[in-house]
Amino acid sequence: MIYLEQDIAFSHARDFIVDLDKLQSTLKEEIAKAQRQYQLSTDSHQQQPPDFQVRQLVFIRSQYFRMTCPSKKLSEKYLRPYKIIAQPSPQSFTLHLLDTMRPIHPVFHVSMLKPAIPNTF
């Protein structure tokens, strides 16, 4: 901040303004430091999503689907494997759904998918 010397009549007032400027700059530095620490802490807990490929089979979480099972607790957690047919963005995939699932939008976020591991038996 720029202050004209003739505007500030008393040296005590001038010292107070200079102290406020120092305090403001110190607080800005401390806030930036705290933000960096929070960012590092948050980034360390982030999990990398599985690397899905086009034509790979994946399961869909059934959390947001209406199921016919009377108890949500006893219903399937994942729906049968579906094939990935496209990747419209880094975090979403288009799946080839059954004709009976036509009202459902075929693009799913990576958090709704789980890789289908083939059964060895």
Image (tube, rainbow, N blue to C red):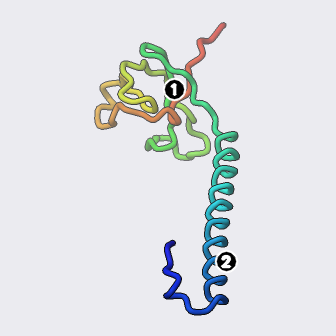
Q: Earlier in the sequence, mark 1 or mark 2?
A: 2
Is residue 25 found left or right of 64 in the rendered image? right
Residue type, mark 2 in image? Asp
Residue designated by label 2: 19
Tell me what residue is drawn at x 50 percent, y 35 percent: 112
Q: CA distance from mark 1 to mark 2?
A: 61 Å
Q: Choose between 114 and 89: the one closer to the eye.
A: 89
Say which element carries label 1: strand
Tell me what residue is drawn at x 50 percent, y 78 percent: 3
Q: Choose between 26 and 8: the one closer to the eye.
A: 8
Which residue occupies the extreme bottom position in the image?
9
Residue count near mark 2 (Cα–Cα under 10 Å), binned few <14, some 14–19, many ≥20? few
Residue count near mark 1 (Cα–Cα under 10 Å), binned few <14, some 14–19, many ≥20? some
Give coordinates of residue 10: x percent, y percent.
Answer: 61, 92
Asked where in the image residue 90 lies, by quadrant, the reply is top left
Is residue 84 found left or right of 58 in the rendered image? left
The image's mark for residue 59 is: 1
Residue type, mark 1 in image? Phe
